[in-house]
Amino acid sequence: MPCHYVNATEASHGDLGCVTSDDICIAFSHSGNTPELAGILEHCAWLKVPVVAITSDENSRLGKAAAIVLLYPKIAEAFANAPTTSTTAQIVIGDALAVELAQKLGKTASDFLQLHPGGAIGAKHRN
């Protein structure tokens, strides 16, 4: 099952063209209200693409637009209100979601290794 990363800033400049009605949108936003989300959420609604929100605010624009909200606590950032702690929380949730979906789809370590031929993981597979 292919996936695409769509940068929120570039989305409204043509990148939304890769999103189809067969897709699911997994959107990461700490506040859920960043202006760049508006066009993405409108496009997903127009195509009837379900949105999964990974956010700290279920009442945000993103939270309200989402079919599923994976909520993490409103946490203080580690430095100067820059995305640090929140991005770590999002990574943890994203990794857990990826592993759970892989297991639900019956994917195995061998399937993963076939798609990861480089680096130390690929070298271990070749030996």
Image (tube, grey):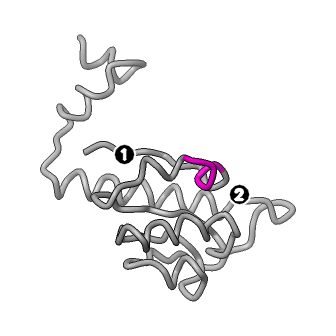
Q: Is residue 115 left or right of residue 73?
A: left
Q: Residue at x 17, y 31 (%)?
A: 110
User: What secondary structure is found at the residue carrying circle 2?
Assistant: loop
Of the residues shown, which amino acid type is indicated by label 1?
Answer: Cys
Q: Is residue 82 left or right of residue 70?
A: right
The image position of residue 97, as x and y in percent, is 35, 60
Give the quadrant of residue 84.
Answer: bottom right
Over which residues does the magenta segment extend? 10-14
Between 89 and 47, the one nearer to me in the picture? 47
Q: What is the residue that sits farthest to the left in this orientation?
A: 106
User: What secondary structure is found at the residue carrying circle 1?
Assistant: loop
Q: Which mark is residue 3?
A: 1
Between 46 and 98, the one nearer to me in the picture? 46
Q: What is the residue that sits farthest to the bottom in this orientation?
A: 59
| Predominant SS along the magenta part | loop
Task: State the residue position of label 2.
Answer: 84
Between 49 and 51, the one nearer to me in the picture? 49
Please check the rendered image and state whether residue 11 is part of the magenta-colored stretch, yes or no. yes
